[in-house]
Image (cartoon, rainbow, N blue to C red):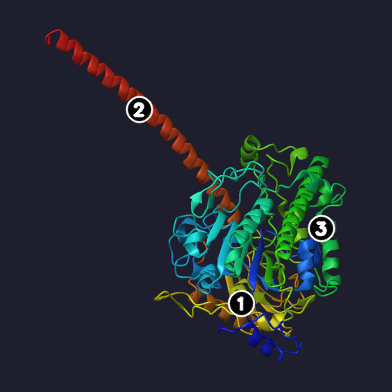
């Protein structure tokens, strides 16, 4: 990635087919601010501008003022995506070959399987900070919790972050069973949340506070804003849930179909693109009245949670407008993976445990003290019209909405939808080019580091047709679910429970829903892409998964191991306390006995 200022960028874009207009005269002199808005577990059509029925007017406004990418890919779960976003480096090379919650024991400690972002990569905060930017992060981090791996140790001037995968949205409480505490820190020190805490409100308010605190410096800022919405537990303010009280009565299949039609009408997917019904989607008609009532309520809460987050995005935008910073700010909105299908209540053991920790009544779903999850039914609607969801390598797990907007600069085609292949590693080099920030070139502070593997999307932002990746292969693997993209085609394999371990080939341009396997009709392409995948796996140190592995079961095992450790600690404290008391009694008895002997002359 070479350094390219906005003036040079504009000149380059004049050569593109879109004939983009040059930026304002002062744009080169004043570098842009950057705001990254990272949603958690939002599916492909979980934004109004991508087909959602719930209200996201502020995110939609960014979409129509800038460019929507309809063929943008991330990892199938959160921290691998976050590490690639932070570094522009593929996940096995940045340390997130797998997450701590999903890695099998056999892979722990292997190269590329650090389960935290390693020290062989440079973050976007380090890169922009070295170029004179103020750098801030608020919200979910999940890339390491020790003193050398928290955000302020990785280039952020100010950071209020959560080290875990998720936490309660109304109080300083962990996901019970997964973590002992909600690991919130500010600038590396444990911090206490306010009593009126709600996650989306807090994450934005902290970012506003950070931006304002240093505004007098005159320096541009990089603001990484990382929401907990809509990660489990699904929770939202009562008024936001009530807004959707008349909706979702017809179930997830009807919603999936309605979203597919809206996405096609918006130009996000081809009209008439085929769509599968996923095997894991329950039959709405076979749900009991009680089950349907709970399902309707959790989707109302999910919609409310998304709308509450969107409102906070609007509050941040309004503040930047009021302070004169909006026009020269680049906004990037994306989700870290597809919709979350996990059903925490799938086993009696889980249900009984959670029932002891939370109020699981239908009336309380989404409120303080609740623990809700949309499950595979509503997740199929969130992924619509794609197949699969979070954790899988199907499009529903990897393809998410991406919006890039620069309100005061005309280099981005307003209102356009770009269908070219794009990847999360492309975000860092794109922002660096737009901001005139130089790449580290594989060397940082005198030592070799992993080079940026992503490619700048600037030509696509200017209207160039196709993808900056051209026909070059782009590999992916996480928890044994694997893919290889090349041009319009995708080679993919999913392990159980979302797949059968068989490799398949799809033409994503005409079949984004992955309904027609071409491996038998295009054997030459299939074999060539298999060779590409093997080369990717070798170059990135990808390990085969142990027999019988599934991410779902590994998460459950992790949770119950954590509970076992807690019980062992409690038992140890009890036993240790008992031993201490017994030792004290023995010591006292012996002391008394010696005293009595001394008093009697040693007899």
SS at badge 2: helix
What is the number of the mark on residue 55? 3
Residue 267 vs 235, above or below: the answer is below
Quarter of the rendering occupied by the C terminus: top left
Between residue 258 and residue 206, name the one nearer to us: 206
Task: Identify residue for label 1.
Answer: 435
Sequence-wise, which precedes: disc 1 or disc 2?
A: 1
Residue 586 vs 473, above or below: the answer is above
The span from disc 1 to disc 2 (Cα, nearest Å) is 64 Å
Sequence-wise, which precedes: disc 3 or disc 1?
A: 3
SS at badge 1: helix
The span from disc 3 to disc 1 (Cα, nearest Å) is 32 Å
Q: Position of residue 538 (x, y in %)?
A: 49, 75
Task: Identify residue for label 2.
Answer: 579
Q: Position of residue 579 (x, y in %)?
A: 35, 27
Residue 25 vs 176, above or below: the answer is below
Q: Position of residue 196 (x, y in %)?
A: 67, 43
Of discs 3 and 2, which sits in the foreground? 3
- Disc 2 crowd rating (10 Å Cα; few below 14, some 14-19, many 20+) is few
Q: Quadrant of residue 474?
A: bottom right
Q: Quadrant of residue 430?
A: bottom right
């Amino acid at each position: 990635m070479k350094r390219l200022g906005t003036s040079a960028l504009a000149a380059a874009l004049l050569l593109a087919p879109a004939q983009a207009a040059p930026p304002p005269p002062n744009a080169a002199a004043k570098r842009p601010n950057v705001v990254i808005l990272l949603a958690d577990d939002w599916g492909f059509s979980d934004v109004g501008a991508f087909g959602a029925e719930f209200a996201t007017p502020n995110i939609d406004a960014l979409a129509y003022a800038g460019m929507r990418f309809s063929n943008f890919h991330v990892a199938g779960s959160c921290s691998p995506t976050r590490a690639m976003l932070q570094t522009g480096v593929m996940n096995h090379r940045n340390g997130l070959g797998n997450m701590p919650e999903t890695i099998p024991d056999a892979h722990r400690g292997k190269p590329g399987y650090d389960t935290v972002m390693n020290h062989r990569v440079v973050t976007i905060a380090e890169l922009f900070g070295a170029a004179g930017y103020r750098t801030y992060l608020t919200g979910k981090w999940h890339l390491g919790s020790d003193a050398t791996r928290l955000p302020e140790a990785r280039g952020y001037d100010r950071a209020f972050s959560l080290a875990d995968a998720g936490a309660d949205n109304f109080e300083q409480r962990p996901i019970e069973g997964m973590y002992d505490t909600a690991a919130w820190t500010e600038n590396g020190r444990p911090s206490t949340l306010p009593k009126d805490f709600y996650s989306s409100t807090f994450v934005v308010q902290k970012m506003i506070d950070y931006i304002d605190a240093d505004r007098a410096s005159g320096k541009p800022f990089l603001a990484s804003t990382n929401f907990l919405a809509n990660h489990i537990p699904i929770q939202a303010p009562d008024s936001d849930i009530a807004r959707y009280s008349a909706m979702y009565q017809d179930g997830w299949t009807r919603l999936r179909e309605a979203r597919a039609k809206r996405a096609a009408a918006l130009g996000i997917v081809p009209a008439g693109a085929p769509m599968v019904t996923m095997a894991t989607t329950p039959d709405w008609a076979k749900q009991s009245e009680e089950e349907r009532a709970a399902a309707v309520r959790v989707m109302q809460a999910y919609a409310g949670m998304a709308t509450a987050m969107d409102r906070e995005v609007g509050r941040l935008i309004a503040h930047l407008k009021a302070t004169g910073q909006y026009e020269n700010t680049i906004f990037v909105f994306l989700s870290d993976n597809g919709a979350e299908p996990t059903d925490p209540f799938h086993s009696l053991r889980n249900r009984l445990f959670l029932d002891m920790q939370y109020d699981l009544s239908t009336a309380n779903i989404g409120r303080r003290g609740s623990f809700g999850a949309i499950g595979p039914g509503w997740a199929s609607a969130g992924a619509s019209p794609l197949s699969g969801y979070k954790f899988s390598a199907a499009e529903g797990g990897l393809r998410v909405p991406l919006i890039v907007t620069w309100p005061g600069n005309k280099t981005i085609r307003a209102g356009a939808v770009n269908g070219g292949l794009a990847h999360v590693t492309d975000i860092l080099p794109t922002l660096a080019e737009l901001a005139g920030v130089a790449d580290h070139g594989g060397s940082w502070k005198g030592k070799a580091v992993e080079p940026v593997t992503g490619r700048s999307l600037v030509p696509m932002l200017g209207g160039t047709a196709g993808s900056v990746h051209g026909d070059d292969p782009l590999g992916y693997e996480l928890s044994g679910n694997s893919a290889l993209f090349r041009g319009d085609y995708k080679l993919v394999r999913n392990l159980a429970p979302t797949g059968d371990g068989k490799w398949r080939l799809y033409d994503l341009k005409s079949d984004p829903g992955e309904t027609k396997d071409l491996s038998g009709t295009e054997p030459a392409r299939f074999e060539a892409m298999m060779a590409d995948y093997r080369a990717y796996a070798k170059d990135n140190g990808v390990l085969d998964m142990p027999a019988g592995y599934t991410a779902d079961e590994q998460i459950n095992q992790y949770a119950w191991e954590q509970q076992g450790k807690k019980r062992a600690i409690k038992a140890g404290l009890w036993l240790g306390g008992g031993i201490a008391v017994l030792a004290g009694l023995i010591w006292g008895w012996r002391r008394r006995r010696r005293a009595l002997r001394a008093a009697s002359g040693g007899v």
